[in-house]
Amino acid sequence: MKAIMEVFANRKYQHILGVIVIGCVLLFPIAFSEHIFTQLLLCTLGIYMIVNTGFDILFGFSGQISLGQAGFYAIGAYCSALLSKAGMPVFFSMIIAASIAALVGYFLALPCAKLMHHFLAMVTIGFGEIVRLLAVNCGWLTGGVDGITRIPPLRIFHYELTSYSAYLYFVLAMVLLALFVKLRIGNSRVGRAMLAIKDNQDASEAFGLKLSKYKATAFTIASFYAGFGGALYAHLIRFISPESFTADQSSMFLVMLLIGGMGTFLGPLIGSTLMLAVSEFLQQFGQLQMMIYGLLIVVVLLVMPNGIAGTLKNKYYQVLSRLPVRPVTDTNGR
Amino acid sequence: MFWQLLLSGISVGCIYSLIGLGYNLIYSASNLMSFVQGEMFMLGAFVAYSVHILLHLPFLLSAVLSALIMYFFGVAMYYFMVGPLLKRGSQQIHIVLATIGLSIFLQNFAMNVWGTNVKTFPSPLGEIPLHVGSVTIMPQQIAIVLVTIICMLVLHLFMKKTKMGTSLRAAAQDPLAAGGVGINVSGTVAFAWASAALLSAVAGVLIAPIYGVYPKMGAILSLKGFAAAVLGGYGNMYGAIIGGVIFGVVETLAAGYLSSSFKEIISFGVLMLVLFVMPSGILKVKAE
């Protein structure tokens, strides 16, 4: 019994456990359902999870706020759609689109490194809006408000993933890969440096950490994740228009991350799942839907300041601290 | 052409300044950012519209009523949402997020109550344009500039000459010490949030005759008000005025000489460029 508790108290195992739980949660409905809408919803969920996992590296790790994630999401979607329509194999177009998004993120991050809180928020809002407005106004390339239709489906080794269930397995694999990479980054030197910068910028600079380097790294990684998510979205829906990449979408990403709990492993996953479920559930209320959604954000923030994952973790440690085995935490108590 | 554009740029810029002033008040009193300013702006316009058009009250009375209602709304917002969050020691970003939630709520609330279509709001000063040389001026544009200047003067005198203004500045500089000398810190912060709401409502009533009233009117204008505040130097009252006017003029000139569809791209581009070159805005931030 004691040994089992120790396993559960160890951070490293919690993560693996979390991955297994999430995998099961995602896989069960498909195993028992042939419902196309559910499959589509789960694909979207997987995409949100990827974007938010990346966003957590930016915000939860390095402490940089972004209200323009939808901009990177849009870059990924548009680039991949255009490249694949030009004849590039879809999987490569996704990777290249995400890399383009990452590159843009890098060049945006360099001058942003010295900006704090509100200023950074403003720049990212401006960036997101500029990307969206470019998509609206450069009709010759992006189709303007009508968007791009008939985006080719994903094809792996002559096997076309046209059905949502097949695509879901691909998305799921990508989610696991994204989580794995995040875990590795979190435990690496770079990840530790980001956390240090978030905790105390001046102290970390005094210790010789190059702020702009780590901040730009976080931005680049987050943009890659967002761009890849956008590309996945484009080939899932196979139609994109600027309407999907508004500032509302950016704040949705932020809300998902904060409600779930930032800087935690499971937070982005819980947040994405919960917010998507809530907004689907509220669909039936028609016009009242967004009103309830807005109110819900306020209420959750008033009740659960650390997000759901943070609150759960605190409770978990509260329970554990009453047990004979002490929880194993790292030096920061995380 | 140039003078015409400059003039309309200045009048639009004044609106941005008023909203920007609200952001600055909130920031200097509580170091926070509020995303609900645009919705205050929209609600102010809607309240004035309801009272003026539907209840047939005179324009001035409905404008004052709308400003008052939004003032008390701001007080309520502070005591029910921001205050509890602050008291519990929430991070800044959580309060920002709460204001995002509230703004989503209010925008959709307005859609449910008043509908989504644009309501016309006749200007109380009439629609007859004045001609000065080759420049055409609408009376409403003059009213916007005048009211903005009056608001700023009142705010300036209030901050520098009254006891409340002094205690607000003290509470902003050092909340702990201010509390120690008997200043009601949470009261002054609530007052700042309420005044910001009031300023936004005034801006909303001013611009309603030009653009009409509709639920989404606050969304883009709140961004630009924020841009004005940041551009001028966040937390600096005079910065917001300069920032707002610059933003309005650049945007209008860009729309006039280049293309109206690229107007927003250019204005946000200019903003980003300014921030990259001068990370704290044109006038430096007063308090860290």
Image (tube, coloured by chain):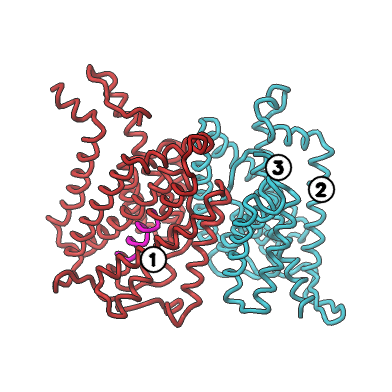
Q: Specify the segment rendered in magenta.
A: A222-232
Q: CA distance from mark 1 to mark 2?
A: 50 Å
> Which color has been applied to chain B in this rendered view?
cyan
Q: Quadrant of residue B224?
A: bottom right
Q: Which residue is mark 2?
A: B154
Residue A81 at what x, y percent from top left? 33, 73
> Mark 2: which amino acid?
Val
| Magenta stretch: helix, strand or loop mostly | helix
> Mark 3: which amino acid?
Lys
Dots 2, 3 in contact, CB < 8 A: no
Q: Which residue is mark 1?
A: A100
Answer with left or right where residue A130 lies relative to residue A242. Answer: right
The N terminus of chain B lies in quadrant:
bottom right
- Badge 2 local density, few (<14 within 10 Å), some, or many (20+)? few
Q: Which residue is mark 3?
A: B286
Residue shown at 53%/47% (left/top)?
A: B99
